[in-house]
Image (spheres, helix red, strand yellow):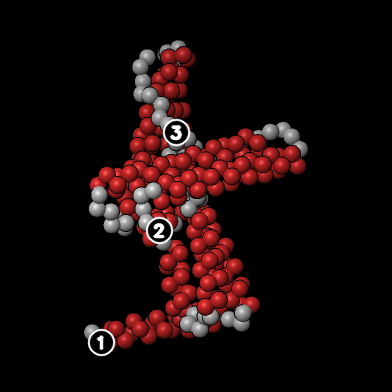
Protein backbone atom coordinates (compact mmCIF):
# COMPACT_ATOMS: atom_id res chain seq x y z
CA UNK A 1 0.00 0.00 0.00
CA UNK A 2 1.40 3.40 -0.99
CA UNK A 3 0.86 6.42 1.21
CA UNK A 4 2.34 9.82 1.84
CA UNK A 5 5.87 10.03 3.19
CA UNK A 6 6.50 11.07 6.79
CA UNK A 7 7.62 14.61 7.47
CA UNK A 8 10.43 15.85 9.68
CA UNK A 9 8.17 17.35 12.33
CA UNK A 10 5.19 15.30 13.40
CA UNK A 11 2.40 17.17 15.14
CA UNK A 12 1.09 14.78 17.83
CA UNK A 13 -2.54 13.75 17.78
CA UNK A 14 -2.86 15.15 21.27
CA UNK A 15 -2.60 18.65 19.82
CA UNK A 16 -5.26 20.54 21.79
CA UNK A 17 -6.98 22.08 18.81
CA UNK A 18 -7.55 18.76 17.04
CA UNK A 19 -7.48 16.11 19.76
CA UNK A 20 -11.19 15.34 20.01
CA UNK A 21 -11.74 15.47 16.27
CA UNK A 22 -8.84 13.11 15.52
CA UNK A 23 -9.75 10.63 18.27
CA UNK A 24 -13.35 10.54 17.07
CA UNK A 25 -12.21 9.97 13.48
CA UNK A 26 -10.00 7.00 14.30
CA UNK A 27 -12.51 5.45 16.70
CA UNK A 28 -15.20 5.80 14.06
CA UNK A 29 -13.01 4.11 11.43
CA UNK A 30 -12.25 1.19 13.76
CA UNK A 31 -15.91 0.62 14.66
CA UNK A 32 -17.06 0.87 11.05
CA UNK A 33 -14.61 -1.28 9.16
CA UNK A 34 -12.88 -3.53 11.68
CA UNK A 35 -15.42 -6.37 11.26
CA UNK A 36 -14.97 -6.30 7.46
CA UNK A 37 -11.23 -6.12 6.85
CA UNK A 38 -8.11 -7.57 8.32
CA UNK A 39 -6.44 -5.68 11.15
CA UNK A 40 -3.19 -5.43 9.16
CA UNK A 41 -4.90 -3.59 6.31
CA UNK A 42 -6.69 -1.33 8.75
CA UNK A 43 -3.43 -0.51 10.49
CA UNK A 44 -1.89 0.48 7.16
CA UNK A 45 -4.87 2.69 6.38
CA UNK A 46 -4.62 4.42 9.73
CA UNK A 47 -0.88 4.90 9.31
CA UNK A 48 -1.41 6.61 5.98
CA UNK A 49 -4.13 8.77 7.50
CA UNK A 50 -1.89 9.76 10.39
CA UNK A 51 0.98 10.65 8.06
CA UNK A 52 -1.34 12.74 5.89
CA UNK A 53 -2.61 14.50 9.00
CA UNK A 54 0.96 15.15 10.15
CA UNK A 55 1.97 16.46 6.74
CA UNK A 56 -0.97 18.87 6.70
CA UNK A 57 -0.04 20.25 10.12
CA UNK A 58 3.64 20.44 9.21
CA UNK A 59 2.75 22.53 6.16
CA UNK A 60 0.74 24.87 8.37
CA UNK A 61 3.64 25.12 10.81
CA UNK A 62 6.07 25.95 8.01
CA UNK A 63 3.69 28.60 6.70
CA UNK A 64 3.52 30.25 10.14
CA UNK A 65 7.32 30.25 10.40
CA UNK A 66 7.66 31.67 6.89
CA UNK A 67 5.24 34.51 7.66
CA UNK A 68 6.87 35.25 11.00
CA UNK A 69 10.40 35.37 9.59
CA UNK A 70 9.26 37.51 6.65
CA UNK A 71 7.87 40.11 9.07
CA UNK A 72 11.19 40.22 10.90
CA UNK A 73 13.26 40.50 7.72
CA UNK A 74 10.99 43.30 6.47
CA UNK A 75 12.32 45.50 9.28
CA UNK A 76 15.96 45.08 8.25
CA UNK A 77 15.97 47.21 5.07
CA UNK A 78 17.88 44.58 3.08
CA UNK A 79 18.02 45.53 -0.60
CA UNK A 80 19.94 42.48 -1.88
CA UNK A 81 17.43 39.71 -2.66
CA UNK A 82 19.98 36.94 -2.11
CA UNK A 83 20.99 38.31 1.28
CA UNK A 84 17.37 38.74 2.26
CA UNK A 85 16.60 35.13 1.36
CA UNK A 86 19.66 33.90 3.27
CA UNK A 87 18.77 35.78 6.44
CA UNK A 88 15.14 34.66 6.31
CA UNK A 89 16.29 31.05 5.93
CA UNK A 90 18.64 31.42 8.92
CA UNK A 91 15.88 32.76 11.14
CA UNK A 92 13.42 30.08 10.01
CA UNK A 93 16.02 27.39 10.69
CA UNK A 94 16.51 28.81 14.18
CA UNK A 95 12.80 28.59 14.95
CA UNK A 96 12.65 25.00 13.72
CA UNK A 97 15.75 24.01 15.70
CA UNK A 98 14.39 25.61 18.86
CA UNK A 99 11.11 23.75 18.41
CA UNK A 100 12.96 20.46 17.98
CA UNK A 101 14.91 20.96 21.22
CA UNK A 102 11.85 21.92 23.24
CA UNK A 103 9.66 19.14 21.82
CA UNK A 104 12.40 16.56 22.32
CA UNK A 105 12.99 17.63 25.90
CA UNK A 106 9.28 17.62 26.66
CA UNK A 107 8.97 14.05 25.37
CA UNK A 108 11.98 12.97 27.43
CA UNK A 109 10.60 14.51 30.61
CA UNK A 110 7.24 12.82 30.00
CA UNK A 111 9.00 9.47 29.63
CA UNK A 112 11.01 10.06 32.80
CA UNK A 113 7.91 10.89 34.83
CA UNK A 114 6.25 7.69 33.60
CA UNK A 115 8.98 5.54 35.13
CA UNK A 116 8.19 3.44 38.18
CA UNK A 117 11.11 4.69 40.25
CA UNK A 118 11.48 6.81 43.37
CA UNK A 119 10.33 10.42 43.17
CA UNK A 120 13.81 11.58 44.09
CA UNK A 121 15.27 9.68 41.14
CA UNK A 122 12.65 11.12 38.79
CA UNK A 123 13.41 14.64 40.02
CA UNK A 124 17.13 14.07 39.50
CA UNK A 125 16.63 12.77 35.95
CA UNK A 126 14.32 15.66 35.07
CA UNK A 127 16.88 18.13 36.41
CA UNK A 128 19.59 16.52 34.31
CA UNK A 129 17.38 16.71 31.22
CA UNK A 130 16.56 20.38 31.88
CA UNK A 131 20.24 21.17 32.25
CA UNK A 132 20.97 19.35 29.01
CA UNK A 133 18.24 21.31 27.23
CA UNK A 134 19.62 24.59 28.54
CA UNK A 135 23.09 23.71 27.27
CA UNK A 136 21.71 22.87 23.82
CA UNK A 137 19.75 26.13 23.68
CA UNK A 138 22.80 28.17 24.68
CA UNK A 139 24.94 26.55 22.01
CA UNK A 140 22.26 26.99 19.37
CA UNK A 141 21.85 30.65 20.39
CA UNK A 142 25.59 31.27 20.04
CA UNK A 143 25.73 29.63 16.62
CA UNK A 144 22.68 31.59 15.42
CA UNK A 145 24.14 34.97 16.38
CA UNK A 146 27.45 34.01 14.75
CA UNK A 147 25.61 33.24 11.49
CA UNK A 148 23.76 36.55 11.57
CA UNK A 149 27.01 38.46 12.12
CA UNK A 150 28.35 37.21 8.79
CA UNK A 151 25.61 39.12 6.99
CA UNK A 152 23.97 41.72 9.23
CA UNK A 153 25.08 44.79 11.14
CA UNK A 154 24.75 45.00 14.93
CA UNK A 155 21.74 47.29 14.51
CA UNK A 156 20.04 44.77 12.23
CA UNK A 157 20.77 41.92 14.64
CA UNK A 158 19.11 43.97 17.37
CA UNK A 159 16.01 44.16 15.21
CA UNK A 160 16.08 40.39 14.67
CA UNK A 161 16.25 39.83 18.42
CA UNK A 162 13.39 42.25 19.02
CA UNK A 163 11.36 40.61 16.26
CA UNK A 164 11.81 37.17 17.80
CA UNK A 165 10.59 38.49 21.17
CA UNK A 166 7.62 40.59 20.03
CA UNK A 167 9.53 43.86 20.64
CA UNK A 168 8.95 43.53 24.38
CA UNK A 169 12.29 45.16 25.19
CA UNK A 170 11.81 48.46 23.31
CA UNK A 171 8.16 48.71 24.33
CA UNK A 172 8.98 48.08 28.00
CA UNK A 173 11.96 50.41 27.96
CA UNK A 174 9.93 53.23 26.41
CA UNK A 175 7.25 52.74 29.07
CA UNK A 176 9.78 52.87 31.91
CA UNK A 177 11.39 56.02 30.49
CA UNK A 178 8.02 57.71 30.12
CA UNK A 179 6.80 56.66 33.54
CA UNK A 180 9.97 57.30 35.55
CA UNK A 181 11.44 60.62 34.51
CA UNK A 182 13.96 61.08 37.34
CA UNK A 183 16.04 57.92 36.89
CA UNK A 184 19.79 58.25 37.30
CA UNK A 185 22.18 57.10 34.53
CA UNK A 186 23.26 54.22 36.77
CA UNK A 187 19.66 53.08 37.28
CA UNK A 188 18.94 53.28 33.55
CA UNK A 189 22.03 51.24 32.74
CA UNK A 190 21.11 48.49 35.20
CA UNK A 191 17.49 48.36 34.07
CA UNK A 192 18.38 48.21 30.40
CA UNK A 193 20.98 45.53 31.05
CA UNK A 194 18.36 43.33 32.70
CA UNK A 195 15.97 43.78 29.79
CA UNK A 196 18.72 42.82 27.34
CA UNK A 197 19.46 39.72 29.41
CA UNK A 198 15.76 38.85 29.40
CA UNK A 199 15.60 39.21 25.62
CA UNK A 200 18.56 36.85 25.10
CA UNK A 201 16.81 34.18 27.16
CA UNK A 202 13.36 34.82 25.71
CA UNK A 203 14.69 34.35 22.17
CA UNK A 204 15.28 30.68 22.97
CA UNK A 205 11.87 29.94 24.46
CA UNK A 206 9.40 27.91 22.45
CA UNK A 207 6.17 29.87 22.89
CA UNK A 208 4.83 33.39 23.23
CA UNK A 209 3.69 32.77 26.80
CA UNK A 210 7.13 31.61 27.88
CA UNK A 211 8.85 34.52 26.16
CA UNK A 212 6.59 36.94 28.02
CA UNK A 213 7.16 35.00 31.26
CA UNK A 214 10.91 35.57 31.00
CA UNK A 215 10.40 39.30 30.63
CA UNK A 216 7.86 39.22 33.47
CA UNK A 217 10.51 37.75 35.75
CA UNK A 218 13.00 40.49 34.88
CA UNK A 219 10.38 43.24 35.15
CA UNK A 220 9.75 42.00 38.67
CA UNK A 221 13.47 42.26 39.39
CA UNK A 222 13.53 45.82 38.01
CA UNK A 223 10.49 46.85 40.04
CA UNK A 224 12.03 45.44 43.23
CA UNK A 225 15.25 47.30 42.46
CA UNK A 226 13.38 50.57 41.96
CA UNK A 227 11.27 50.06 45.08
CA UNK A 228 14.45 49.55 47.09
CA UNK A 229 15.73 52.81 45.62
CA UNK A 230 12.71 54.64 47.01
CA UNK A 231 10.28 54.57 44.09
CA UNK A 232 6.60 53.94 44.84
CA UNK A 233 5.83 51.97 41.67
CA UNK A 234 2.08 52.00 42.25
CA UNK A 235 2.03 55.76 42.62
CA UNK A 236 4.38 56.24 39.67
CA UNK A 237 2.06 54.12 37.54
CA UNK A 238 -0.99 56.11 38.56
CA UNK A 239 0.74 59.43 37.79
CA UNK A 240 1.88 58.09 34.44
CA UNK A 241 -1.69 57.07 33.56
CA UNK A 242 -2.85 60.59 34.37
CA UNK A 243 -0.22 62.11 32.08
CA UNK A 244 -1.23 59.77 29.26
CA UNK A 245 -4.89 60.69 29.65
CA UNK A 246 -4.06 64.41 29.81
CA UNK A 247 -2.10 64.12 26.58
CA UNK A 248 -5.03 62.37 24.89
CA UNK A 249 -7.45 65.03 26.10
CA UNK A 250 -5.18 67.82 24.88
CA UNK A 251 -4.92 66.21 21.46
CA UNK A 252 -8.69 65.84 21.17
CA UNK A 253 -9.23 69.46 22.20
CA UNK A 254 -6.73 70.67 19.61
CA UNK A 255 -8.69 68.88 16.90
Query: Against 40, is 237 above or below?
Result: below
Image side of residue 56 versus residue 255, left or right: right
Q: Nearer the viewer, residue 182 or 105?
A: 182
The residue at 37%/85% (across/down) is 246
* Residue at the spot of label 1: 254
Q: Nearer the viewer, residue 24 or 140?
A: 140
Can you tell which of label 3 and label 2 is closer to the viewer? 2
The residue at 28%/54% (across/down) is 78
Q: Residues within 10 Å of mark 2 (few under 14, many from 20)?
A: few
Q: Earlier in the sequence, mark 1 or mark 3?
A: 3
Instruction: Identify the element where label 3 is drawn.
Output: loop
Q: Nearer the viewer, residue 225 or 253?
A: 225
Q: Is residue 66 visible?
A: no
Quarter of the picture containing the C terminus is bottom left
* Residue at the spot of label 2: 154
* Residue at the spot of label 3: 10
Q: Residues within 10 Å of mark 3 (few under 14, many from 20)?
A: some
Amino acid sequence: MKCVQPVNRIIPFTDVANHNRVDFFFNFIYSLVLPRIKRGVLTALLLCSSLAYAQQNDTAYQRVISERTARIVNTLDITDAAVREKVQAQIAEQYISLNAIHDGSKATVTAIKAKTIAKEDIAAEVKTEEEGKTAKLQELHKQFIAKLKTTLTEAQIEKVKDGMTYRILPVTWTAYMDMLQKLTPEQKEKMYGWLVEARELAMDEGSSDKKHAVFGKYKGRINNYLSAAGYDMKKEGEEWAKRIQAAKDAKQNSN
